[in-house]
Image (cartoon, coloured by chain):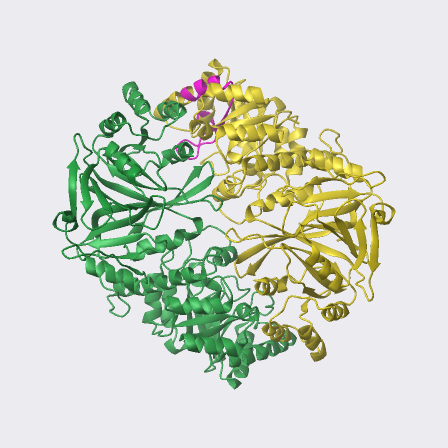
Chain colours: A yellow, B green
Amino acid sequence: MRTSVASVCISGGLVEKLHACAEAGFDGVEIMDADLIAAPESPEEIRALCDRLGLKIEMFQPFRDAEGVSEELFADNLRRAEAKFQIMERLGTDLMLVCSNVATASVDDDEVIARQLGELADRAAVHGIRLAYEALAWGRYVDNYRRTWEIVKRADRPNLGVCLDSFHILSLAHDPAGIEQIDAEKIFFLQLADAPALDMDVLSWSRHHRLFPGEGSFDLVGFMTHVVRAGYSGPWSLEVFNDTYRQTDTVRTAAHAHRSLVWLADRTAAANGWSDGLLGEAPQSTGLDFVEVAGADLAEVDELLAQLGFAFEGRHRSKPVRLWSAGSARIILNEQARQSEPVLAGIGLRTADAAAAVSRALALGSPSVFRRTYEGEQDLRGVAAPDGTQVFWSSLPAERSWLQEFEGGTGVVDGLEGEIDHINLAYAWQDFDEAVLFMSSALSLQADAPAEVPGPQGLIRSQVMRTPDGIVRVPINLAPPTAKPPARHIAVRCDDVFTVARRARERGIDHLRIPANYYDDLAARFDLPAEILASLRELDLLYDRDANGEFIHFYTRTIGDVFFEVVERRGGYDGYGGANAPIRLAAQR
Amino acid sequence: MRTSVASVCISGGLVEKLHACAEAGFDGVEIMDADLIAAPESPEEIRALCDRLGLKIEMFQPFRDAEGVSEELFADNLRRAEAKFQIMERLGTDLMLVCSNVATASVDDDEVIARQLGELADRAAVHGIRLAYEALAWGRYVDNYRRTWEIVKRADRPNLGVCLDSFHILSLAHDPAGIEQIDAEKIFFLQLADAPALDMDVLSWSRHHRLFPGEGSFDLVGFMTHVVRAGYSGPWSLEVFNDTYRQTDTVRTAAHAHRSLVWLADRTAAANGWSDGLLGEAPQSTGLDFVEVAGADLAEVDELLAQLGFAFEGRHRSKPVRLWSAGSARIILNEQARQSEPVLAGIGLRTADAAAAVSRALALGSPSVFRRTYEGEQDLRGVAAPDGTQVFWSSLPAERSWLQEFEGGTGVVDGLEGEIDHINLAYAWQDFDEAVLFMSSALSLQADAPAEVPGPQGLIRSQVMRTPDGIVRVPINLAPPTAKPPARHIAVRCDDVFTVARRARERGIDHLRIPANYYDDLAARFDLPAEILASLRELDLLYDRDANGEFIHFYTRTIGDVFFEVVERRGGYDGYGGANAPIRLAAQR
C-alpha cells in the first residue's frame, strides 16, 4: 500500500505540511490548490522540496464546476483549466481531481457532461495530464459514483477516470459493492475519510466532521475490501476536513493521520485473510500489570496509598522507584520523572505475546520508550502514546519477573485486597480522537458508546476504551476547550467498599466530600433501605444502580494531577457511575 | 417584565451562579435539580441566599418521565415526586416543571396521562406546589404544546398548568399562534431560547446549540407577541443549553443573558407599539466619527499612518492623544491606555440622538465609560462592549466639537482622501455570540450571513455587522479555540488604491507581501487584462470581483494587535474580499 494525504487535512503552511507528511511516513500527498496559492514558494520550489522529501505529488485538487454547463461558461472553464494545467506542469504532477459540478451546472444530461469532460480531458492530454472525476455527495446533478463511472465510460478518453471518495459514497449510504464493477485501470484515485454518525446536512458533515479511518462509524474495512477486489493498486489517500485537525499541531496530526491508514490496511487485510498490509495478529491484553505515577516528590501519594490499605512492596534496587500493591493492583511510584507534579505516566499490560504487541505498536508509528535496565533486571519494552503516556507489555507474570527487583517491603494489616478496575485518562479536547485511535489500533481496545457529563466548567466528553472481556478498561475524558484537562485517576475494585472506606477513614485519609443534597436525591431516585443510605452518607460513598446490579464508590483528594477511586461492583453492573460524575466534578472544584 | 434564568444556562457552582444572576439584574431563577444536588449548600442556605440577593426562585426543574406509564411505575414516580416536593418546600419555591415523558412512557392516551398528572398535582397540592407541564420536542408521545393544553384542561386541577418553551415549539415549526387559545392563568411558566438554523436532530440541537434571544434564527418577537396577547404576565425565563455558555465566565455570561431578554422585550414592544419594555427608539448610526488605537507607545503607528498618506491633525491639548485623518477617516492614537501593545480600543459613532443611544446601551446593561474632560472640551459619552472595546456616540459633527481640541497639525502633500470602509474586530471563539448580541442590541447593527475562512491555524468564523445602508460596517472574526484571536484592523476606502499603494511604497511603507502563486491563480479565475494583473502583482494588491463590481485592496504590516487596510470599491461590490482572506492570514503568519 502506498500512503497519501491531502494537504488540507492538517494545519500550517504548505512547506510545513509537506515536512510533517514526510516525517510521518507518507509516500505521497494531494496538493490543494488553495494551499499552493497561499504559499510564498513557487510550484518549482514545492516540486523540488517534495523530491527531496521523497513525497510524490499524487494529485492536484480540486478543479470545480467544470461540466454540465452552457457552452459559453464551458469555454471559460477550459481557459481556467489551461492555467491550472500549467501550474501542474510546474509542480510536476499529472493527475487532477475534477469534482462534480455543485454551483453552475445547468444541464442534467450524461451526453453533454461526457462530451464536456472529454473535451477537458483532450486539453489535459496535451500537457500529459489525467483527470479523476469524482461525485460530490452534494453535486447538483452528479452525486453518485456509479454515475461518474457511466459518464467516464461514455466520454471514453484514456486520460479520464474516476476518483472514489469513501465519504461521498458512504454518507449517502450508496452501496460500495458497485465499485467492483469499475475497471481497475479506470479508478484513477482513492480518497478516504471516516465520519461519526451524525444526523445533519451532508455538506456541513463533510466540511467539518470528517475523521481519520477508525475514528468514525463508516465500515471502511468493507469499503476497502471492494476497492481492492476491484483491482485498485494506487495510493490510499486521506482527505479529511475536520475543524479540529485544521488547528492541532502539524507534525503530531500527520503522524495521527498516517497511523489511521496503517490501521485500515491492517484491519482490511485481517478481515480478508490477505497478508499484504497485515501487521500480524493483534495480541489481546489479558490484564493490567501495573500503573505508574511519576513526579519529582511522591511522598503524598505514598501516604494516600497507605491510608487506602495498599501494602508497601519496597524500593527498586537500582532506581528511585517504589511499589505499592493491593491484591493484584500494583502502583509504581517513579521519582525519576521530569514532571514536577504527580501524573499518571504509564501503564503495564499483560499479554500472551509482548514482543508482538510492541512490534505492532511500533509499526503503527508509536515511538519506542527506552528504560535503562541493569544486569538481571526485567527488560521493559513499550511505546509512548501520542500524549506521552508510556505503555509497556509483559508476557511473564509480575511475580516471576520485575517484582523481585523491589526490596524492603513492609506489608500491611487489614489491607485492601483488590484489582485495578479501570484507569481514567483525561485529554485536552483537541487530542481526543488521536487518543482513541491510538488505543484502538496500538492497544487493540474497543470503544464503547460515547457519553457527555455536565461539569461546572462545561461538558466533559467521555469514552470508555476496553477489552471485550472488560479486563482492561480505560475511560477517557475530554475537557472543554476553555478548561484544563481534568486530573487522571486509578480505580481499584474491592469486595467491600464500606469496610475499605471505614478503615481508610481510621487511617486519616483525606477523601472527597459529597454534598448532603446528593443523598436526598439518592433517596428520591432509589428506594434504598434507610441504614444503607445512612452508611453511604456517613462514608461519602456514591451509589449507582442499573438493571444488572449496583456500583458503590468513593474518591480520594487529588495530588498533582492524580487521584484514586475505590469501587465495588455488585451483580452485573458494568458501568462507571456516570450519573455521579457531575457530583464528583463539582466536589473536586 | 420580570426576568428569570435557568441555572443551567451558565457555568460554575450554584452559589456562584446565583450571585452572577443577581449582579446581572435578573429578578428570578429556575433552579435545576442537578445544580442543587451537586451543591454543598443545603436548600435552606440556597433559599436564604436568594432572599438576600433579591432573587425569586421561580421554578424547580425538571421532573422527568412522570406520566403515561404503567400503574406500578407511576406509584414509584409519586414516591420520587414526594421527595422532590420536600426539597422544594425547603427551597421555598412552589412551581415544579414536569417535562413530557421521554424514556418510560408506554401509554399514548390523553385520558391516562391526564389522570396521572391530576393525581401528581393532588399530591403536590398538599405541599402548596403547582405543576407546569411542558411538551419536549422529543417527547415520546407528547411533543406539542397544544396537546399539553388539552391534557391540562382534561386533568382540570387548579395547580396544574402548562409551561411554554420557545425552543420546543419553534424547533418543530409548530405555529405559536395557538398560544393565544390557552387561558392566561393556565400558562404557569415561559421558557425562552433562540437557536441557529441547523439541519440536525432536534435533541442534539437543543442540548448543545441553543442561543440567547436575538442570537439565532427563531422569530422570538413573533412568539412573544402571541404569549403577551394570550395574557401571560409571569416571568420571561431563559433556558439555554449551550456548550459554550456552560464554560464561559459566569458573571459575564449572566450579563450577556440578561441583555438578550431586555433586547427581546424592547423589540417585542417596538413591533407591537407597546410602551411596556420599550427602551425608546433605537437611534441609527449615520457614520463613524473616529477609530481609536490605544497603546503605551504608538510611534510606529504614527509612522505607518504617515506612510499611508494620513494627515497629522495635531496633539490633544490636555491628553497624550494624537489625531490623524484621511478625508473623513479619523484615527485617534491614545497613549493614556493601560495596554502595552497597540490595540483597536474604541470607536466613535455619529447619530442623530447621542443621548438616546447612550441611554439605550446603558439600559441594555453595558457599563458606562468615563473620560475625564476639561473646561471647553467635548464631553464624550459612551459604554464598554463586553470585551472592553469602548463605543462613543456624538450628535455634533466632529468639525464643530472635539476636533478643535487638537493642535499643531502639519497636513500632508499627496495625502490619502478617504473614509472608513469597515472596522474588523476579532474575538476569542467563546466571545463571539456575546459580541454579536451587543452589536445588534446596543449598536443596532444587523448581522449579515456568517461565513467561514480557512486559515493556516484553523477555520476563522466571520460575521459582518452593519447598518442597513452600509455606512457603518463591522466584520467580526472568531479565532479557532487553540489560536489567539487574530489582530484587528481598520480599512480605509479610497478612489484609487493603485495610487495610494504606490505613494505609500514611495514613503517606505512595510506592507503585506502577497505570494506570486496568488496572481497565477487570479489569472486563472478572472480574465484580467495583462497590465492590470501586472500592477496588482507589482503593488501586492488583492483583487476580488462579483456580479456587481470589483474590490481591490492591500494591507499594512501588523503593529501589536492592529493593522490597516486600504480598499477601493468599483461598481456595486458590497463584500470584503473574503476569497482573499486565506491569503492574508497565511501571509500574516
Q: Residue B121: percent from the left, percent from the top?
A: 52, 80
Looking at the rendering, which quadrant does residue A80 occupy?
Answer: top left
Which residue is painted at 71% across and 52% down in the image? A473
User: The N terminus of chain A appears in which quarter of the rendering?
Assistant: top right
Estimate the x, y position of residue A16 in percent, counting from the top left: 52, 30
Q: Position of residue A45 (x, y in %)?
A: 48, 20
The quadrant in which the C terminus of chain A is found is: bottom right
- Outermost residue on the bottom side: it is B126
Q: Quarter-wise, where is residue B573 in the image?
A: top left
Side (left or right) of B234 relative to A400: left
Outermost residue, top side: A126
Vertical position of residue B233 compared to residue B428: above or below: below
Is residue A106 on the magenta stretch? yes
Question: In the picture shown, does residue B406 fall above or below A55?
Answer: below
- Observer-nearest of B461 and B557: B557
Can residue B569 be seen at all in this image of the molecule? no
Decide if residue B144 is in sight here: yes
Vertical placement of B383 versus A144: above or below? below
Question: Is residue B339 covered in magenta?
Answer: no
The answer to whether residue B277 is left or right of residue A275 is left
From what the image shows, is residue A18 above or below residue B162?
Answer: above
A146 and B570: which one is in front?
A: B570
Residue A490, percent from left and from top: 70, 56
Query: Residue at the location (25% across, 38% down)?
Result: B492
Number of marks present in the image shown = 0
* Residue A16 placement, left or right of A311: left
Magenta part of the chain: A83-112
In the rendered image, the residue lying farthest to the left is B400
